[in-house]
Image (cartoon, rainbow, N blue to C red):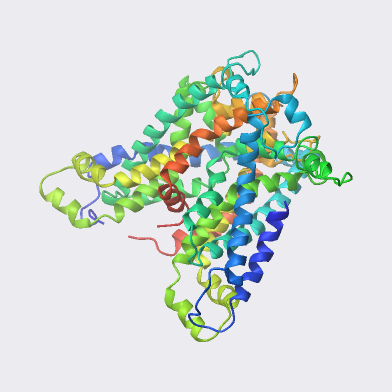
């Protein structure tokens, strides 16, 4: 912008370069260097300490033969689909409801969003308590007279991941609602007027006009949710610690446990590289669309 | 549970209800539309508030009352003992000085982390917006893409770096880690804000002979207080709520509050004291909640600024 007409030399603009040293170091050393380092060492048989003793794809073969990793991946997929679908649907519906020029909009929005201010640890512990079969919702319903009622997702290995998803949705939907609301507010009022004049029902206007117009918002939201899904860790640690057994393990926890408890760094690196790969599948096309198209000179 | 399942379907019905004759129809306060609309919103709001209510109610009961009663009933006999115990005497491992230790650790982590990360990111943003040098945009794109790399990929190399410098396990190390991982989002925030400021301002200051630091300190900083507040809100809640970095980069006696809370509640020894656990949970959530309720719309702006591209 301002300095585009000036020639570039090493000492031109020196102060800006000095001020950017932390950014350059972070970008190159931590983000690029750290990632490359981890990927490189995922091909070694490092145990307690990282060693450059290459064993090819051994760690990956072992990884995909480990039941705990397979369960982690399955859980992540279920959790991911639930998070994506429900937080998008609920978030959008709540935003659409708040967009009806209602009274107390701020109050409602404040209530829907406050869980987002809480940490996953707090969220996980609260829901652990609510879903406690001896004291929580199950007990309350049984005390009302329905004695065979069963609702103990955190103690039932076949549905435990759904119990975790409930807590995650409670915590995160408010954010999606806010993003959607911002998107809805960006829609021109005239669109609504035109649709009304044409007699198009409201739900059709939303479905066929407003939602397609909000495509950028949806894409951004999708990327945010997707990045959050892969990172899920604290919530599981707080709510179930991966239990019962290994039924609610997730990849992020697998990585942490292998790096810092099992002293099997190579496995941890291989698992984290797989996580990176899954994120890249989502991020690279998005980044290409975002930055590739309109690079400024 | 019923509520969350019901809300989307309810709402799906709702707009259709309004689809009759088009145009500005006079609306009565108790029209079917309004009953649906506010009914749904109130039910959902209750669902969202329920966990907070249960937390507070549980923390004010004694253990006998918890064993007998139901989690939704208000306390018969209010007791603050669980709160005192959670704060001052709850045990994690060998330490029996309660959450207060974690609280002060978190304060000592959060304050410098917030200051350092914002100082760095605002300078980055300023350099990127007004003093762009060759290659600056490349670093910026790496930074933004890097924000999506799972932390697990970079955790171990950072452990090695910190160990080499000799600050692994110290609060200083954790502060640096927070500054690193806060950088992408904050830099984006500041870059967008500074870019949107009038170019003439910058040019005039240049003509008057002000340099990089002069313009930053005397013009940009005073003019961008709102965005600094947004950044502070974003960072205070984010760093206070962090668990992963705390557990990786600190030692048991310097654990932040979230880690200590998890250790107290999920410890396997001893009788579970649910009231103490809930009091501890509220105490840990209190700081971000206070920030949230005080900051109001700025909080929304912060997360929206972080999320939606500028």
From the viewer's side, name the closer residue of A168 and B139.
A168
Furthest residue toward left: B208
Residue found at the very far right of the displayed protein: A148
Residue located 49% across and 49% down the image: B145
Single out the residue that lies furthest toward the bottom: A198
Image coordinates for residue A61, horizontal then vertical, percent: 76, 42
Is residue A53 in view? no
Q: Residue at the spot x=55%, y=70% of the render?
A: A211
- Residue B163 location in percent, x, y? 51, 22
Residue A35 in which image quadrant:
top right
Residue B24 pos. (x, y %): 48, 80
Q: Residue at x 49, y 41 (%)?
A: A31
Viewport quadrant of the N terminus of chain A: bottom left
Q: Quadrant of residue B228?
A: top left
Q: Would you identify the image quadrant in which residue B71 lies?
A: top right
User: Is residue B83 shown above or below A82?
Assistant: above
Residue at the location (74% across, 45% down)? Answer: A163
Q: Where is residue B211 in the image (x, y as percent from the top left)?
A: 17, 42
């Amino acid at each position: 912008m301002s300095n585009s007409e000036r020639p570039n030399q090493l000492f031109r603009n020196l102060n800006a370069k000095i001020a950017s040293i932390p950014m350059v170091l972070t970008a190159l050393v931590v983000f690029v260097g750290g990632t490359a380092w981890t990927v490189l060492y995922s091909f070694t048989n490092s145990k307690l300490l990282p060693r450059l003793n290459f064993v090819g794809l051994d760690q990956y073969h072992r990884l995909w033969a480990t039941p705990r990793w397979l369960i982690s991946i399955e859980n992540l997929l279920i959790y991911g689909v639930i998070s994506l679908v429900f937080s998008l649907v609920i978030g959008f519906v709540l935003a659409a409801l708040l967009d009806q020029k209602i009274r107390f909009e701020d109050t409602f929005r404040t209530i829907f969003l406050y869980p987002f201010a809480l940490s996953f640890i707090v969220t996980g512990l609260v829901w652990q308590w609510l879903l406690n079969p001896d004291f929580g919702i199950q007990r309350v319903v049984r005390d009302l007279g329905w004695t065979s009622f069963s609702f103990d997702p955190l103690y039932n290995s076949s549905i435990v991941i759904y119990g975790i998803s409930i807590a995650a949705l409670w915590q995160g939907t408010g954010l999606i609602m806010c993003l959607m609301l911002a998107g809805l507010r960006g829609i021109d009022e005239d669109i609504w007027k035109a649709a009304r004049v044409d007699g198009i029902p409201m739900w059709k206007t939303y479905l066929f006009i407003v939602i397609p117009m909000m495509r950028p918002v949806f894409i951004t939201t999708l990327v945010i949710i997707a990045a959050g899904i892969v990172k899920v860790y604290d919530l599981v640690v707080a709510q179930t610690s991966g239990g019962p057994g290994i039924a609610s393990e997730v990849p992020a926890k697998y990585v942490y446990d292998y790096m810092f408890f099992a002293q099997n760094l190579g496995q941890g690196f291989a698992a984290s590289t797989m996580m990176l790969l899954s994120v890249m599948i989502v991020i690279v096309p998005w980044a290409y669309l975002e930055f590739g198209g309109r690079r400024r000179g | 549970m019923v509520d969350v399942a019901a809300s989307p379907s309810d709402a799906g019905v709702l707009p259709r209800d309004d689809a009759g004759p088009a145009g500005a129809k006079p609306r009565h306060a108790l029209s079917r539309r309004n009953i649906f609309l506010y009914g749904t919103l109130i039910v959902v709001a209750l669902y969202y508030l329920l966990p907070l209510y249960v937390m507070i109610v549980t923390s004010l009961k004694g253990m006998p009352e918890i064993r007998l009663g139901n989690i939704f009933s208000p306390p018969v006999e209010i007791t603050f003992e669980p709160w005192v115990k959670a704060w001052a005497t709850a045990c994690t491992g060998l330490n029996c000085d309660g959450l207060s230790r974690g609280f002060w650790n978190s304060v000592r982590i959060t304050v410098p982390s917030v200051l350092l990360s914002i100082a760095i990111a605002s300078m980055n943003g300023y350099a990127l917006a007004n003093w762009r040098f060759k290659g600056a945009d490349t670093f910026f794109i790496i930074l933004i893409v890097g924000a999506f790399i799972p932390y697990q990929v970079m955790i171990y190399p950072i452990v090695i770096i910190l160990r080499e410098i000799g600050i692994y396990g110290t609060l200083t190390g954790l502060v640096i880690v927070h500054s690193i991982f806060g950088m992408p989002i904050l830099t984006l925030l500041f870059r967008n804000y500074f870019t949107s400021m009038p170019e003439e301002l910058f040019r005039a200051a240049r003509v008057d002979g002000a340099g990089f630091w002069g313009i930053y300190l005397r013009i940009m900083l005073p003019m961008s207080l709102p965005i600094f507040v947004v950044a502070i809100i974003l960072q205070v809640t984010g760093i206070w709520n962090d668990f992963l970095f705390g557990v990786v980069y600190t030692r048991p006696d310097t654990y932040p509050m979230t880690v200590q809370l998890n250790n107290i509640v999920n410890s396997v020894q001893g009788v579970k004291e649910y009231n103490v656990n809930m009091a501890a949970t509220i105490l840990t959530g209190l700081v971000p909640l206070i920030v949230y309720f005080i900051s109001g719309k700025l909080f929304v702006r912060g997360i929206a600024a972080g999320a939606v591209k500028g």
